[in-house]
């Protein structure tokens, strides 16, 4: 969540979903990812209302009634619990947890492992941990033509210089 919005406990959110109206439906229970020191650690919240203000998504949560309450959740991540083996509805689409940990193959050789997925406005980036460093790989079909989740790897065909000698 980005910041408190208004005086009645609303929170402006950054979306990582194609269906916010479904994810933030009134009554949906969401898990919170917060630091262990937070009073909210290990707790869930229920959606009271979801709205758009000036083209920005804003959520109201049960029990969050004031701006001060909302400020306690700034930078928290809202998550929906999904079975780990469930695939998104669209083909060639994966949840982050399905990509993290996959071995990365270049010309048939393992050169690293997906450490995390960064979501940027233009495209997603796979952060690949190689022997010596982290490599940012644009997650586009021309560079990542194959994802084989069942066998635990993905194939990269990077432009020259992306995986430099000594990083493999």
Image (cartoon, rainbow, N blue to C red):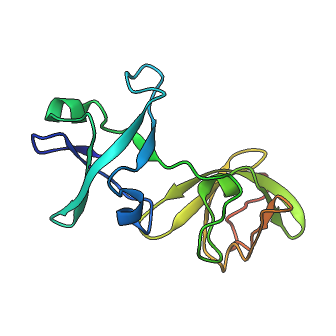
Q: Nearer the viewer, residue 5 or 25?
A: 25
> Is residue 58 visible to the viewer in this orientation of the structure?
no
From the image, which quarter does the C terminus lie in?
Answer: bottom right
Q: Is residue 23 left or right of residue 5?
A: right
Q: Position of residue 93 (x, y in %)?
A: 61, 70
Furthest residue to the front?
27
* Residue 36 position (above or below residue 143): above
> Is residue 67 visible to the viewer in this orientation of the structure?
yes
Residue 22: name its quadrant: bottom left
Q: Position of residue 53 (x, y in %)?
A: 16, 61
Q: Nearer the viewer, residue 157 or 4?
A: 4
Q: Position of residue 49 (x, y in %)?
A: 25, 53
Residue 127: name its quadrant: bottom right
Q: How many marks?
A: 0
Q: Is residue 115 left or right of residue 19?
A: right
Q: Is residue 5 left or right of residue 78?
A: left
Q: Nearer the viewer, residue 146 or 38?
A: 38
Residue lying at 66% horizontally and 65% vertically, measured from the top left: 87
Residue lying at 9% horizontally and 40% vertically, measured from the top left: 7
From the image, which quarter does the N terminus lie in?
Answer: top left
Furthest residue to the right?
108
Furthest residue to the left?
7
Furthest residue to the bottom?
142
Q: Is residue 78 left or right of residue 65?
A: right
* Residue 106 position (above or below residue 62): below
Residue lying at 82% horizontally and 58% vertically, measured from the top left: 152
* Residue 101 position (above or below residue 94): above
Residue lying at 45% horizontally and 27% vertically, measured from the top left: 35
């Amino acid at each position: 969540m980005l910041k408190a919005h208004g005086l009645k406990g609303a929170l402006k959110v950054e979306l990582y979903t194609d269906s916010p109206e479904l994810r933030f439906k009134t009554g949906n229970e969401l898990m919170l990812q917060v630091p262990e020191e937070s009073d909210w650690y290990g707790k869930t919240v229920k959606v009271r209302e979801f709205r758009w203000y000036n083209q920005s998504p804003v959520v109201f949560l049960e029990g969050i009634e004031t701006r001060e309450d909302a400020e306690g959740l700034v930078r928290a991540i809202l998550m929906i619990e999904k079975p780990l083996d469930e695939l998104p509805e669209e083909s060639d689409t994966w949840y982050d947890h399905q990509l993290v940990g996959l071995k990365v193959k270049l010309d048939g050789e393992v050169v690293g492992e997906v450490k995390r997925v960064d979501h940027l406005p233009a495209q997603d980036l796979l952060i690949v941990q190689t022997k010596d460093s982290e490599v940012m790989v644009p997650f586009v079909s021309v560079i990542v033509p194959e994802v084989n989740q069942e066998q635990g790897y993905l194939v990269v065909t990077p432009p020259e210089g992306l995986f430099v000698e000594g990083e493999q």
